[in-house]
Image (cartoon, helix red, strand yellow):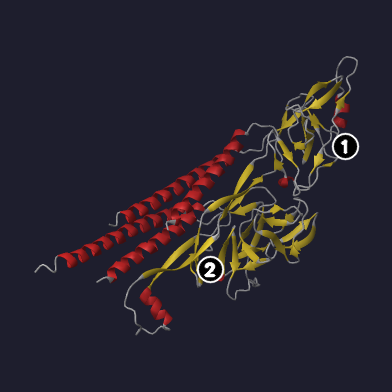
Amino acid sequence: MLRGFYIASNGLINQQKTLETISNNIANSQTPGYKADTSIQNTFKRELILLNGGRKNSTGTIEYKYTEASYTGLTQGSFEFTKSPLDVAIQGPVYFNVESNAGDKLLTRSGQFKIDDEGYLALENAGKVLGQNGAIYVGKSDFTISNSGEILINGKSIDKLQLSYVDDTKNIEKFGNNTFKLVGDASGQVPQDIKYSIIQGAYERSNVDVGVEMTRAMAAQRSFEAMSQALKQMDLINQRAANELAKI
Amino acid sequence: MNVGFYTARSGLITMQQGLDIVSNNIANQQTNGYKALRPSFSDLLYTVQKPQDAQAQTGDGVKVLKTDLMYERGQLMLTNRPLDYATPSDGFFATKNAAGDISYTKDGAFSIAQDGTTWKLVNANGENVLDENKNPITLNLNANGEIDSEELTSQLAVFKFENPYGLEANGANSYFQTQSSGEGIADNSLVKLSGSLEQSTVDLGEQMIKMIELQRGFQLNSKMVQTADEIASIVNNLR
């Protein structure tokens, strides 16, 4: 009987986690290059089956719901054109590479770059933007980036942007400061047949759809409410069982 | 813990700060030589929900990462006032205040001030305008008490930056050089036009759109605060 208690309370925790994810998406609805997260849920039973290698004669019969993962939607955000040469956007499934101060390679779609104190192209708080030959020294804001990512100063190519290909959301993890990190065995190598285009003078906006997020928030909130009702019912049943069943 | 509360709160604060910047741009729509600022946002660090699985991440909100100086050339306005100067190329005028700080400006509405027995070219704040050696410009008046406009134009220096996007806004229409912008270098080849002024680059339509976006962002975040509050109230009423 007590099982229902825990199923409902798991539902509460889940909906709350979903709301946290939605809340973060809405907070970042104006963040350049931000990719929306969706929290995905799975049942405990299904998870046990999966853990048992697909065999159904597993031990669990309890349908706990719990947050399995958060899924980052890698869809393209829209562009905003700004005329600033330091704003760069990507169309296609590739990411800029940034070297963090700790030496890690980070990925980003946030193209609001700056020129740092040493004259390198950089992403604020994250690190230097990488080209084929390491950090890109531009020195001045008067440079051009071609559609293929070639960086030109006075018509002469000085470097080409280093890009990483991300085909699956499983291969990246968010790292804050508008950056991602490659995880697992993903190499980020850009295959020959992948088409992309680099656009200077524009930046990519967040891909958060606030309409969808608000709808999900409403659904999650009501679901939370329903779970709390279920919990109260369960409590009532237990109360009856404890106080009235004994009075025969 | 009810993290959603604080995530939405960070959204509220950030949208508010964004609105402050946009509002300042709109206020300076008529300011000579003003360059629009742009708020640039960034997400905060992520919390891993299940320690063994990095895929289950929840974000913690948003912040204003930096404000970008959206440097671009402004339109020129003809005033026919001989002491109004504009630099249609990417040049800046340099001024020095009483404390000796040098700042750079696109606002060329100058005047003449008497300094003892000499006459100096000053900006609206009374700061000395500098020549190419970064010395205050002293004017020679002719017998009729008139200035020699040509001589003044030749004395007035125009400074150029490798990266004008790196300049630091200092208020009073002026900018400080930073390591990122590089040193201001006097360049005689840059054009200076007497009798015209550079207008603000603020595009009112663009700023209004930004304002609406940010206001709606604020509203949505406030809805999320409300939702988080209702969640808390449901929890409080469980028993």
Q: Mark 2 = which residue?
A: A169
Q: Position of residue B208 (x, y in %)?
A: 55, 39
Could you tell me which residue is drawn at 76 percent across and 24 percent down?
A: B80
Which amino acid type is marked by label 1? Answer: Asn
Residue B89 in view: no
Which chain does the residue under circle 1 lie in? B
Residue B206: horizontal and vertical position, in percent? 58, 41
Residue A47 vs residue A201, the one in the foreground: A47
Q: How many marks?
A: 2
Mark 1 and mark 2: Cα distance apart in space: 57 Å
Nearest to the observer: residue B162 or residue B100: B100
Report whether B37 appears left or right of B229.
right
**Left or right, A18 with reference to A111:** left
Q: Is disc 1 placed on a helix, strand or loop?
A: loop
Judge whether B170 appears above or below B236 on screen.
above
- In the figure, A55 relative to B197: above or below? below
Which x, y percent locates residue B203? Answer: 62, 39
Disc number for residue A151: none
Q: Quadrant of the N terminus of chain A?
A: bottom left
Q: Residues within 10 Å of mark 2 (few under 14, many from 20)?
A: some
> Looking at the image, which residue is at 78% across and 60% down?
A157
B105 sits left or right of A12 in the view: right
Question: Could you say which disc has been placed on residue B133 in the image?
Answer: 1
Q: Same chain for the residues at labels 1 and 2, yes or no?
A: no
Q: Is residue B78 visible to us here?
A: yes
Callout in the foreground (1, 2) = 1
Tell me which amino acid carries mark 2: Thr
